């Protein structure tokens, strides 16, 4: 199915959870924050929450900044 | 938070201790500073600072020129009524004084207005004693409605009002408030105001803030010099000004330095203030708050007033009478206090011009009031 | 002498805040923080870039500091609010530096949008420190909206040009009853000291440290400059005397008393 990740269209397997996605993209889960369709998703829900077609996902992390 | 909270915080200030520590080099440093803090202001009120009076004068003169130019705004008081329920022991209108009581009728107000307007003055200060029965807010509104036809700016110096009442008067055409705390020292205040609504120190102290919230354009405060120790009184009045200036940046803030004058009742000031003390007070205040207006009334002699023009003063009363009907039918009746500078408006204008200053008779015209606007008069000449 | 900075009730031991952007290597950051003695440290949020390996920036920060995420990238109030909420989810705490920039040429902050963002975030319990163009009325609105401190710019971000807005910042220091923290434009320790001598509560420095030849040494220099400037402010400097002016005496008339 197709979803939007950080503004770009991406193809992911059906029934993918957020954790599945992070694993596939080799992103350590402790360095990112997830916003799904404009809402922040708490870390404890990343395993159970399955993504749906056309979901818009923002994967955000902390970097150096002034 | 109101200024009352701030003054509570200041009431334990040990002034004599603070003054003793002031050194000559500290005063020199303060005079070279761009912006003064409250403790600098306090230092300038110390006996030590009196040795640097001329230096203070030069600095104060320069600051006043910088912010106000060579101008002196002129106004005159109009006493509407001397009925009063208060017992201020220092005042000629004290309720217990056996003097003829009178309140102007609207027709008489108009006659006084015409007589004053004929001198060219456009800024008027109207005064009453405190009597909600004889001179209620409705009476003052009626008077303002008459006076608006003759004056471009009307200030009130009456008993303290509620925010709503100030708003009502502003809607009628009042744009300025003068209210003196008389004495900031709460103990002395209580002693000098034994009876009447004026006993309420806090209600009076917070009156300028209420007027500010109501949208008053100009607010003028002061301490009646002679009632309390002048150094601390001027300090607290200055702190009050600084508070108002900070709280209401849109308001034109000014201060008067009224010294006790002989009056019916013959109260003798317990803390006399010399000319030198008065000059130090004015200069300290000018250096602390370079942008506030400073008012000197006809309580002071012509000679002193002429000298004060170069020492920070920006507003002066002229052609004054403190009696009811003083500009028309009763020039010799008993006033609130005795006038010292008895020069006419015309004489004042000439003197100010001779001293190299411009007498200003009008610096405000409210386009929202008074219907017809004479564009020729409003445009900048 | 007791001289502590408090922001939103929390004691802050160093008046030098540092930013962590523009460092050649995150490995420098622990040493920079240590050398500067800074306690408040800013970070930013970005979308993950899948092209490059990700590392956990937070692991370079000591545990006892106050983290202050900024909302850089926000072009309006709504975006700043969104970024602030995300930042809180990272476990960075409640502090946030509001930075709304709609001008990409000079990178000047948008004071109007910033006020709107403060109104919302202060109500949500954030400790809001707005980055702003030094304007008295805007600062008052920000204080009313619930800001915990005000962070006026000394000159545009990253320019290292010093405190060009000196007169305007001085007015904020006099008139606003909140800590005034000079942010942006400070290029040298002497300029940080200047801000502190003026009475600023703190300064925030990033580019000048991050882009120095030796960032750790520069961080130490800034730390010392901020302390020196603060001490100078507290000691009440005797300013230079004005040139004496020959003028006639104004108080001569009093002598006959």
Image (cartoon, coloured by chain):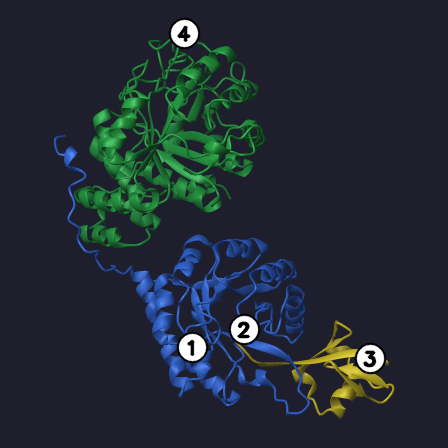
Q: Are there few (<14), some (14-19), or many (20+) residues within 10 Å of tag 4?
A: few
Instruction: Tell which tag, 2 or 4, sits nearer the viewer.
Output: 2
Is circle 4 on the same chain as circle 3? no
For the residues labelled 1 and 2, the Cα–Cα distance comes to 33 Å
Q: Quadrant of residue B10?
A: top left
Q: Chain of mark 2?
A: C
Kindly identify which residue carries mark 2.
C105
**Horizontal and vertical percent position of residue B364:** 45, 34
Instruction: Identify by letter the chain in yellow.
Output: A
Q: Are there few (<14), some (14-19), or many (20+) residues within 10 Å of tag 1?
A: many
Kindly identify which residue carries mark 1.
C37
Instruction: Identify by letter the chain in blue.
Output: C
Q: Quadrant of residue B172?
A: top right
Kindly identify which residue carries mark 4.
B100
Query: Residue placed at 55% from the left, 59% from the top?
Result: C147
Q: Is residue B278 left or right of residue B327?
A: left
Instruction: Tell which tag, 2 or 3, sits nearer the viewer.
Output: 2
Kindly identify which residue carries mark 3.
A49
| Residue B202 in view (yes/no) | no
Query: Residue placed at 40% from the left, 87% from the top?
Result: C214
Q: Is residue C194 left or right of residue C80?
A: left
Instruction: Identify by letter the chain in green.
Output: B
């Amino acid at each position: 199915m197709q979803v939007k990740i950080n503004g770009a269209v991406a193809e992911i397997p059906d029934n993918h959870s957020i954790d599945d996605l992070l694993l596939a993209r080799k992103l350590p889960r402790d360095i990112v924050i997830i916003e799904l369709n404009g809402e922040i998703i708490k870390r404890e829900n990343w395993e159970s929450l399955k993504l749906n077609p056309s979901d818009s996902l923002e994967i955000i992390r902390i970097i150096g900044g002034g | 938070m109101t200024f009352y909270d701030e003054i509570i915080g200041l009431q334990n200030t040990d002034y004599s201790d603070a003054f003793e520590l002031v050194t000559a080099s500290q005063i020199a440093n303060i005079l070279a500073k761009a912006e003064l803090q409250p403790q600098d202001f306090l230092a300038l009120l110390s006996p030590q600072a009196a040795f640097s009076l001329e230096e203070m004068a030069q600095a104060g003169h320069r600051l006043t020129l910088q912010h106000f130019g060579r101008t002196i705004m002129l106004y005159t008081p109009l006493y509407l009524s001397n009925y009063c329920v208060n017992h201020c022991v220092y005042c000629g209108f004290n309720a217990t004084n056996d003097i003829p009581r009178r309140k102007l009728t609207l027709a008489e107000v108009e006659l006084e207005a015409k007589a004053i307007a004929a001198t060219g003055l456009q800024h008027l200060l109207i005064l009453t004693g405190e009597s909600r029965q004889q001179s209620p807010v409705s009476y003052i509104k009626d008077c303002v409605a008459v006076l608006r036809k003759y004056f471009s700016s009307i200030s009130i110096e009456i008993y303290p009002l509620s925010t709503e009442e100030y708003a009502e008067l502003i809607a009628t055409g009042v744009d300025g408030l003068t209210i003196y705390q008389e004495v900031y020292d709460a103990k002395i205040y209580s002693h000098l105001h034994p009876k009447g609504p004026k006993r309420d120190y806090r209600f009076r102290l917070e009156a300028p803030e209420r007027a500010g919230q109501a949208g008053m354009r100009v607010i003028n405060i002061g301490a009646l010099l002679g009632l309390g120790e002048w150094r601390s009184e001027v300090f607290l009045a200055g702190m009050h000004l600084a508070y108002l200036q900070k709280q209401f940046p849109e308001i034109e803030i000014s201060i008067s330095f009224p010294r006790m004058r002989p009056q019916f009742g013959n109260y003798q000031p317990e803390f006399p203030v010399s000319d030198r003390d008065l000059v130090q007070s004015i200069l300290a205040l000018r250096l602390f708050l370079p942008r506030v207006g400073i008012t000197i009334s006809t309580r002071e002699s012509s000679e002193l007033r002429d000298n004060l023009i170069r020492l920070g003063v920006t507003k002066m009363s002229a052609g004054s009478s403190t009696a009811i009907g003083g500009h028309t039918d009763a020039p010799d009746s008993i006033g609130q206090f005795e006038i010292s500078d008895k020069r006419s408006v015309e004489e004042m204008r000439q003197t100010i011009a001779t001293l190299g200053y411009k007498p200003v008779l009008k610096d405000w015209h409210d386009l929202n009031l008074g219907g017809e606007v004479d564009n020729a008069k409003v445009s900048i000449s | 002498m007791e001289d502590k900075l408090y922001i939103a009730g929390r004691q802050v031991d160093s008046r030098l805040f540092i930013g962590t952007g523009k460092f050649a290597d995150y490995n420098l950051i622990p040493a920079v923080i240590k050398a500067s003695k800074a306690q408040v440290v800013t970070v930013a949020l970005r979308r993950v870039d899948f092209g490059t390996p990700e590392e956990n920036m937070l692991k370079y920060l000591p545990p006892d500091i106050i983290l202050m995420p900024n909302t850089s990238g926000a072009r309006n109030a709504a975006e700043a609010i969104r970024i602030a909420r995300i930042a809180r989810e990272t476990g960075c705490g409640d502090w946030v530096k509001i930075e709304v920039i709609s001008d990409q040429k000079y990178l000047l902050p948008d004071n109007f949008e910033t006020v709107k963002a403060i109104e919302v975030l202060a109500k949500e319990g954030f400790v809001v420190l707005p980055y702003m163009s030094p304007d008295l009325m805007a600062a008052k609105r920000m204080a009313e909206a619930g800001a915990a401190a005000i962070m006026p710019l000394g000159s545009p971000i990253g320019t290292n040009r010093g405190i060009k807005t000196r007169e305007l910042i001085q007015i904020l220091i006099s008139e606003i009853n909140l800590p005034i923290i000079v942010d942006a434009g400070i290029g040298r320790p002497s300029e940080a000291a200047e801000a502190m001598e003026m009475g600023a509560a703190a300064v925030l420095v990033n580019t000048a440290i991050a882009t120095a030849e030796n960032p750790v040494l520069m961080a130490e220099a800034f730390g010392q400059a901020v302390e020196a400037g603060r001490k100078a402010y507290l000691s009440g400097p005797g300013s230079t005397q004005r040139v004496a002016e020959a003028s006639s005496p104004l108080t001569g008339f009093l002598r006959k008393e």
